[in-house]
Image (cartoon, coloured by chain):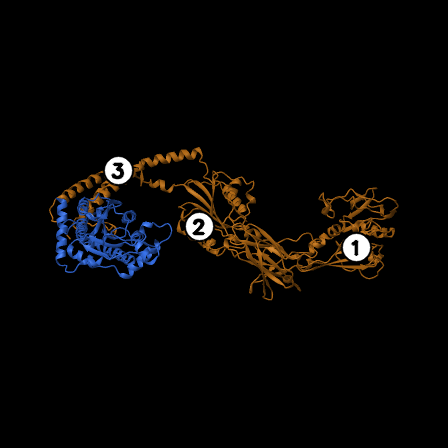
Chain colours: A blue, B orange
Amino acid sequence: MEISSLSLRARAVVEGFMSGLHRSPRTGFSTEFTEYRQYSPGDDVRFLDWKVMARTDREFIKKFEDETNLRCTFMVDFSKSMEFGGDDAGVKKSDYGRTFAASLSWFLTQQRDAVGLATFDRDVREFIPPRYRQDQLKTILGRLETQPAGNATDLCQALEKLASLVGKRGMIVLVSDFLSPLDEMERCLSLFTAAGHDVRAVQVLHPREVDFDFEDAAIFEDMESGRNLILDPGMAREAYQQKYNAHNAALDAMFSAQGIPGFRVTTTEPLERVLQRFLEERPARAVVRQRRSNARNAA
Amino acid sequence: MSFLTPLYLLGALGLAIPIILHLLHDRPKNKQEFGSLMFLDKTKPPVDRKRRPTHLLLLLLRCLALLLLAFVFARPFVTVDDPADAALRDRQWITVLLDRSASMQRADLWAQAKAGVQTTLGQLGPGDRFTLIAYDDSTELLAEVQSWLGSSSGAEVNAQLERLAKPGFGGSNLGQALVLAGESIEGDEPGGDELETDEQPLARREIIVISDLQKGSRLGDMQGYEWPTGIKVRLEQIGEDDQGNAGIEQVASRSPWAAAEAVPSFRISNSVNGIGDELEFLAHTTAGETLSQKVHVPPGRSRVVELPGEWADKSVERLAIRGDAAEFDNQFHFAQNRQQTVRIVYIGEDKPNDAEGSLFYLASAFQQSSTLDFQVEAVSGKSSGPLPEADLFVIGDAVDDSLAQALGQAIEGGATVLMVVQSSGQAANLGQWLGADGVVIRDIASSDYALLQSLKLDHPVLAVFRDARFSDFTNLHFWKHRELQNLPDEGIDVLARFDSGPPAWLAARRGRLLVMTSGWKPGDSQLALSTKFIPLLYSILQPVLEGKTQSRQFVVGSEVDVTRFNNGQAGGGVTVMPPGDGAAAISVDTIFTPPAPGLYTAKGAGWSETFAVNLKAAESRTEPIVMDQFKKLGLPMTDPVASPGEIAAAAAAAEKTEAYRREYWQWALAAVLLFVTLETVLAARGSRPAEPVMIT
C-alpha cells in the first residue's frame, strides 16, 4: 500500500510534469562524452580503441564509453531531522524529499537511464548502484518507503563513504535539509566534483524552519540529538533568522564554488514545478570545464 | 546577637528548595520538536506575568518560614550588659612605637604609618591607657594618655602626631625603643597603693611597632633583655612590597701611614630584591658640573668604587647614585679632607742626604699624603736661635744650654720629643729633661749584636705591635748601644730592654719624652730598615695626629667635636652653618649633633671648614627583617599565658553572661506558624482557576 502510494504519487507528479513539456528535456543531461588518452605500457589492452589504431596507427585508450546516456544516483537524507513537519503546516520534509527522488527516478527510468539510490543518516544505510533494469524502479521505491532509523546526520561522513561506492561518473542528486555544520562539507562534496560527477543539491526545508513562526514558549527538542531548550520564540526569532540566513548564504557560496547547482525548496512548493526547475538547470559551462580539468589532473 | 547552636543555621540552605520549585514551575510545559537547534540560543524563560506577584509573595513567605525555622533551631540570644558591669570592662595599655627613621621617607610609608596609628586609636575604649613613642636613633615620647576619653584624647594625640610632618634622617634603633617601652611598662606595674579602687587593673599590655622593619634596624639592645611577663608585642609592618634599594657609603681609610696617596673610595651596595643591576654613579662639583659613570652591581652584592682620577681633581661636593627604587638615600655629601701640616724638627748635626745619618731616614719615613703634609726641618744643636714650633722634636745630638732650656719647657708643656742617645755628650741634656742629676751615658763595647727583649706592649707607644703577628722583634739587630746610668727610680717607664739587660727604649712619665739608647742609623742598628720603624714613629706621633686629623665625614645624629677643626686649634665659640640658603647659624661650644644630611660649614675666628653629614649606611638596607630574628631575640609576639586567677575571672564572667541572656526563639516560632498559615491561604487562592489566562 505504501509502495503503491509512493509510486502513484511519483507517477502523478511526472505525468503532470510531462504534460506541460513539449520539447524533450533530454538535452539537459544526456551529453556523455568519451575521452581518449595515449596508451602507456601497463594500461589494460581491452580499452585500446582499435578503430583509431587502425586509422592512425597510434594507440589510444578509450576511457569511457557507456552504453546508456546517464547514470543517476539519488542520495537521500534519512536522518531524524528530515522527519520535521507533517502537522497542519505542510508535509514532512522526508516525505517531500522521497517523493521528489521517486518522481525523478520514475522519469529517468522512463528515459531508459540507469538510476541508483543511496540513503544515509550518520552513515550510509542503503546503496543501490545505478542500473537500468526492469525491477530497478520498484526496488528504489521500496527502499525509499522504509522509515528513517532516527540517527543524527553526518552528511560529510556519509558522502565520504558514498564517494568510494559510486564508481563510474554520473549524476548525483543530493536530497537533504543541509542543516548541519558546514565545516567539512566542502571537502566532502569536492570528492564528487573532483571525480567528475555532475552533482546537484536539493535542500528541502519546512516553512517553519524558514520563518520560525512559532507562537508559544515551549521546550524545543532537537529531533536528532534530543537536546532540550526552553525558548520564547518571539525573543529567539531574530537571532534564529540571522543565523539561518548566514548558514544558507555559506551553503550557497560553497555550492557555487564547487559548481553545484543548488535548489532550495520548501515542502509547500508544488513538486512538479520543482522538477521543472530542476531539469531546466544546466551546470555552468565554465565550471564544468574547470571541474573536468581538475578531474583529469587528479587522475 | 549570638546563637547557642549555630550549626542549625545551615538549615537555611533549605531556602534553595522553594526557589528551585518556583523556577521549575515557570518552565513551559509544552514540548516542540524541531529539526535542528543549531540556530537557536537559550533565551530567558518566559513568565506568565499575571500570576507573577502571587508567585513572588508565596516564594517570599516560604523562604521566610524556612529561614525562621533554621533561626529557631539555632537558639538565638542577646546578652544584655549589666549597666554597672559596662564601666568595669577590661582596660588595656597600648604603646605605639612609631618609626621615624630615614627609611620611612620611602614612597607613602609615612602616610601608612600615620594611618596605622589612627587605626590603633580607633580601637581604644574609655579608660584605656595609650602611649605614643617615636623612635629613630633616639626615642621621643610624643603622647601619653593615662585614661582614654574618646575624641578629646584623640585630638590631643593627633596634635602631637601632626607635629611630625615628616620622618627624620636618623637610623633606626628598634632594639632600644622596644627595650625602653618594655621597661616603662614594667616600671609601671601597679603596686598596692597606686591602684585606685574604682579603676580596673590594666588587663592587657601591648606594644605595637609601626615600622618598615628594615634590615638596617639595630636590635642589639634586645639581646639579653628579659621581657616582663604579660606583654605582647605586635609588629605592624608597612611597605612589605619593598622594591629594593641601593646605598652608598664611604669606605673608611686605613691606618694613616698606609693611606699615603689614598683616593676616596665608596661602597655601592644593592639589596637582594633590587630592581636592576645597572646603577649610575654621579658626582656634582661645586662648579655645578655633573659627572657620571655606570656601575654594575648585581642585586645582593656590593662594589667598592674609587673616585676616578679626573673627578678627584675637580672639587666634588656631592655624590649620588641613580637607578634604584627608593630615592631617599641616593645622595652622598662629600667634603674633601683638608691637608693638615705636621712639623717635625730634627735637632742635630746630620746632613739631609747622608744615608749614614738619622735625619735621612726620619725625613723618608714621613711621606706626604692627601690628609697630612709633613714638614721636616733640621736645626743644629748649637744654634742660638729660638726653638721653632713643632709637633715632634727629634734630638740626635747634644744640645746647647739655651736650646735645651727651651726644649725642657716644651716637654713640660706637653710637646712630643724623641731623643736618640748617640754620644755621651747628651748626658747633661738627658739629666736636665728627666729631672735627675748625674746621669751618665756609657758606650757598650761588644763584638756581638744586641736584641730587644721585655717589650712593654701595653704602653701606648708599643700598643701598635701588640698583635702576635707584629710582636716579633728578633729580626731587629742592634750593633751599637749605650747604657744609661744613675737614672731616677721613678718617673720612667722602660719600654724595652736589650738582651744584655740595660734599657733600650724609655718613656718619661712627665710629658711625652721618649729615649732610645740606640738609634736607627745603619751604624747603630737595623731599625731604619725594618718594618717596625714607620709604625713606631707614627705611634709616637699618634697623639699629635689624633688632634690634627679630624674626619670631614659624619652621619646624622653623630657627635661632631668642633674643637678639633682648624688643625685642632678651633678654640671656643665655633659657629656652624647648616646646609641650605638662609639657614640660621648655630653657635656651638664643643659637640654638635647634626640633625639632617648636607654640607655644613664650621666657622671660627679667621677660619672656616666644611664637613659633610650623611645618612647612616644601615638605613639603605631596606629589605624587611626576617621575622625569625625577633623570635630568636625572645620578643613576646604571642598572647601572654593567662594566669589561673584570670581563668577563674573569665569563668565568673561567663556565668554572669548566662544570667543576662535573653532568648527569642519562641517569638521566631510564632512567626513561622504565621507565615505558614498565610502561605496556605495564598496558595489556595492562587490555585483556583478563577481568572482566564491571557495568551500573548
Label 3: state its secondary structure: helix
Q: A146 and B193: which one is in front?
A: A146
Where does the image place residue A177, in percent across and percent down from the top left? 22, 51
Query: In the image, is residue B53 above or below residue B284?
Result: above
Query: In the image, is residue B502 above or below residue B651?
Result: below
Residue at mark 2: B116
Disc 1 marks a residue whose amino acid type is Tyr
Determine if residue A156 is in view.
yes
Q: Earlier in the sequence, mark 2 or mark 3?
A: 3
Where does the image place residue B315, in percent across and percent down from the top left? 63, 63
Where does the image place residue B297, in percent across and percent down from the top left? 57, 53
Q: CA distance from mark 1 to mark 3?
A: 105 Å
Label 1: state its secondary structure: helix
Task: Single out the mark in the foreground, 1 or 3.
Answer: 1
Q: Is residue B544 left or right of residue A101?
A: right
- In this view, the residue farthest toward the front is A54
Q: Earlier in the sequence, mark 2 or mark 1?
A: 2
Name the mark on residue B361.
1
Q: Earlier in the sequence, mark 1 or mark 3?
A: 3
Disc 2 marks a residue whose amino acid type is Gly
Q: CA distance from mark 2 to mark 3?
A: 42 Å
**Mark 2 packing: few (<14 Cα in 10 Å), some, or many (20+)?**
many
Instruction: Give the residue drawn at x 80%, y 61%.
Output: B386
